[in-house]
Image (cartoon, rainbow, N blue to C red):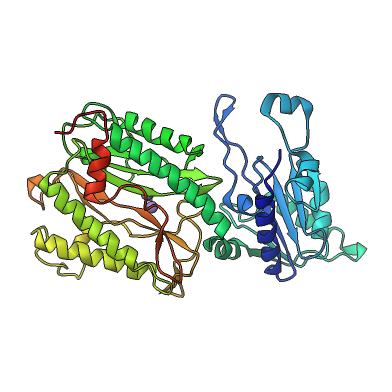
Amino acid sequence: VQVPSTWKKEVHERRVELISKLEGGALVLFGASSKRRNSDSEYDFRQDSNFLYLTRFLEPDSVLVLRSTPPHTVLFVPPRDRERETWDGRRAGVEGAVSEYGADEAHPITALAEKLPDLLENVSLLWTIFRSPDLIDPKLTQAIFSVRARRRKKVDSPVAIHDAAELLGGMRLIKSPFELEQMRVAARATRDGHLAAMRAAEPGITEFELQRVLEDGFRRGGCRHVAYSSIVGAGANATILHYRENDAPLPERGLVLIDAGAEYEGYACDVTRVFPIGGRFSALERKLYELVLEAQLAAIAGCQVGSTIDAIHELAVQKLETGLLELGVLSELRDALGKRLVEKYYMHRTSHYLGLDVHDVGTYYEKGQAVPLVPGAVITVEPGLYFAEDDESVSPEFRGIGIRIEDDVLITPDGPVVLTQDTPKSVDEVEAACLGSSRAPA
Ligand code: GLY
Ligand code: MN
Ligand code: MN
C-alpha cells in the first residue's frame, strides 16, 4: 500500500487541527466494520466518513486515537497475516499504519484491550462519536474502567466524555482545495454517466438498462462507487422521490428522472436531471421544466456567504408558486390554516450539505436560527415539481409528470460556483444530449 504524499499531508493537517480543538483531551474513533451480505460474502466495505476524513485508511475494524500529548496519532489496525492476506487481500499492517498512514505509533487491533488504557492514562477529557443504542463503544467503556483500576498507581482516569460529532462536522463542512479537487472528479464522472444515459434513452429499454449505462459512465470516470442508490424513474415513476425499483420499461413518450451521483475518494456528487424519452419535450413538459429550472437558477443565485438554506429554499418556492399560479395549478398560495399549497407538488427541501456523506455533516440550525452559509461549504440546490398519477387536483395532462433539477454548489466570497455545471441542463442542452443517441431525431 502506498499513499500519495498529497493525501498524507492533507490528513495530517486535519489531525493537527482537530487535536488543537480537543481541549487537552483525547479522541477515540472506531472505524466501520465489514458487514455480512449473505452466506460468507460481505457488502462492499465503506469506511466510516469521520475515520476516512482523519486517516483515509480503508481497512475494516480499525481504531484511531488522537492525543494532545505524544504519541499524537495512534492506529489500531488488522495485523499482517500471511494466510488471511492470501484469502482476503493485502493489509497495511502496523508498519504501513506508521509509514503510509502517518501514525506515530500503531498496534494490531487484537491488542486494543491491552493498549488502549495506556493511551487514556491521565486523560481527563475523552472525545468520541456518540452512537445508538449504546452511546459509546463497549470497548471504550472497558478501557475507561481499566484505567480506573490503576488509580492506586497515581493514574488519573477520564472524567468526561464529549461527542466529537460537531467538532468534526465543523471541519468537514468547509472543503479544502484538495477536497474540492476530489469532488470535481466525482462531478466529471457524474456528468459522463448522465450524458450517456440521455443518449441511450429510447422507448422499450428499461430503467435498469439506463442505470447500467449511467453507472458505467461513473466507472469510466474513475469512480468505483455510487454516492447513493441511483434513482432512475421513467414516466410517473419520476414522481416517487426515492424510487429505487429501476426496472420499468420506458414508455413511448414522457420524461425520465435520474437522480444519481458518483463517489470519488469517498466524496459524493449528487445530481438530478430530467429528459424527454423521444428527445423533445412536449409543450407542457417544457413549460414545467423551465419553471423548475427558473426556480433552481434563482436559488443558485442566492447561494451567497451569509445567506441560509432556508432563504435559498424560499427563493425556489416563490418562483414555483408564481409559475403554478400562472399555469392555473394554484389559485391561491395558502389554505385556511396558512399552509403553503405549493407543498402538495414540492414536498421536499431545496438544499442539503454535501461531502463525504451525500447528506453531509454540518448544522442547519443553532438555537432555532438558520445557520449562515460559510465559504467552502458545498450544498445541493434541487427544487422539483411532482404531480402524482392519481392527483385529481390537477388537470389530467399534468398527472404523472415529475421534475427535479439538482446541482452541487460551492459557496465562495465571489458567489456560487456550480461544481456540476457541465451536465446538460437547459432545454436545448438536454434535447441535444438526448438526440445524440443512435436514433434519428424526429
Ligand atoms: N439523492 C438524494 C438527494 O438528492 O438528497
Ligand atoms: Mn440531494
Ligand atoms: Mn439527489
Whether residue 229 is situated above or below residue 426 in the rendered picture: above
Whether residue 145 is situated above or below residue 68 in the rendered picture: above
Which of these two is toward me, 175 or 21?
175
Q: Quadrant of residue 410?
A: bottom left
Which of these two is toward me, 190 or 156?
190
> Which quadrant is home to the C terminus?
top left
Q: Quadrant of residue 50?
A: bottom right
Which residue appears at 10% of the width and 52% of the height?
394
Which residue appears at 25% of the width and 38% of the height?
434
Q: Is residue 114 visible?
A: yes
Q: Position of residue 189 (x, y in %)?
A: 44, 42
Q: Position of residue 26 (x, y in %)?
A: 73, 62
Q: Position of residue 312 (x, y in %)?
A: 33, 67
Position of residue 435 in the picture relative to residue 313 (left or right):
left
Q: Position of residue 213 (x, y in %)?
A: 37, 32
> Which quadrant is home to the N terminus?
top right
